[in-house]
Image: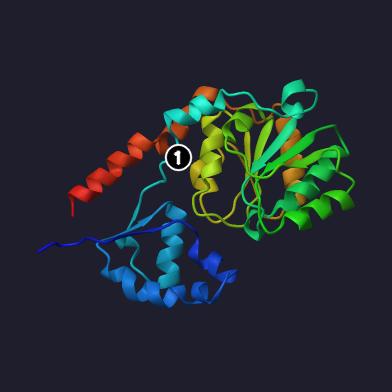
Amino acid sequence: MLIYRIIVTEHNTLSRTLLHPANVRTKLMPFFMKLFYPMADHVIAVSNGVADDLSKTLNFSRSKIKVIYNPVVTDDLFEKADEEVDHRWFQDKQYPVILAVGRLTEQKDYPTLIKAFYHVRQQRKAKLVILGDGEKREELLNLVKDMGLEQDVDIIGFVQNPYAYMKRCSVFVLSSKWEGLPTVLVEALACGANVISTDCPSGPREILDNGNYGKLVQVGDVEALTESILRCFSGSYDIDLDKLLSRSNDFHVEKIAREYIDLFRLL
């Protein structure tokens, strides 16, 4: 008789997801999770922040949750990062370029980034590129227009290879209100980008090791984000490339695969 083992994995900050339920199913999730998660052989969380939140939200023992990071970094990532970028702002290098990558949703809080960029533009010339699509696209385009930034902001949409952009940007910004383990931060580190992120729950502080690998600012703080971008332009936050690569290797697919293999051996 076959014996099946069940491993469940949590990728996002559950308490924050429940504050913004997409449908009735999302609202009912905690009931079913409390019922079925204790039956699993293992419960995996992609960050310590996600694990802590899951334990608190479900009243589930933290000792029963194992943290294994997402396998983000691959050799293919580095190959794609070396490809050319077909965008004039990255080719002429006339002005520093701020880059953000992710779906255009409430979670990513792009209005805060756009407002911060508006204040950056009051002090120096720069460009902002956002890679991603989503339901907030028209709202963000209207905000860009209202702030008179049409010539300096390009919301491109989804691209197959964001890594080439990451490698060539002046600063990479994550402005999210909440996350689980933001993959794009790890990818940006692997590409050698200067990183600024909100200190949202959860993941950024963990990935950036309390700010050792990038700057952390409070969620929704336009002034702090503006100041951090300007300081990054001035070189105040430059971090050695080898140091960034070393940190990103903690999320390499081979390392994470070994952790899962070790887990499977316990089943």
- Image quarter of the N terminus: bottom left
Q: Is residue 7 left or right of residue 105?
A: left
Picture residue at 33% right of the left edge, 67% below the top: 61
Q: Position of residue 11 (x, y in %)?
A: 45, 56
Picture residue at 18% right of the left edge, 55% below the top: 267
Q: Hey, what amino acid is under mark 1?
A: Val
Q: Position of residue 168 (x, y in %)?
A: 65, 27
Instruction: Count every numbered label the image shows and give the total.
Output: 1
Check disc 1 and report the residue beneath it: 72
Picture residue at 41% right of the left edge, 71% below the top: 58
Q: Position of residue 30 (x, y in %)?
A: 44, 74
Picture residue at 35% right of the left edge, 62% below the top: 62
Q: Residues within 10 Å of mark 1 (few under 14, many from 20)?
A: many
- 209 vs 109, nearest the viewer: 109
Q: Taking the image as drawn, is residue 36 in sight?
A: yes
Residue ranking furthest to the left: 1
- 81 vs 10, nearest the viewer: 81
Colour pattern:
rainbow
Q: Is residue 260 left or right of residue 243?
A: left
Q: Is residue 101 left or right of residue 153?
A: left
Tell me the SS state at disc 1: loop
Q: Position of residue 20 (x, y in %)?
A: 60, 69
Q: Taking the image as drawn, is residue 213 in sight?
A: no
- 218 vs 40, nearest the viewer: 40
Q: Is residue 267 left or right of residue 46?
A: left
Q: Please, is residue 37 above or below residue 105 in the view?
A: below
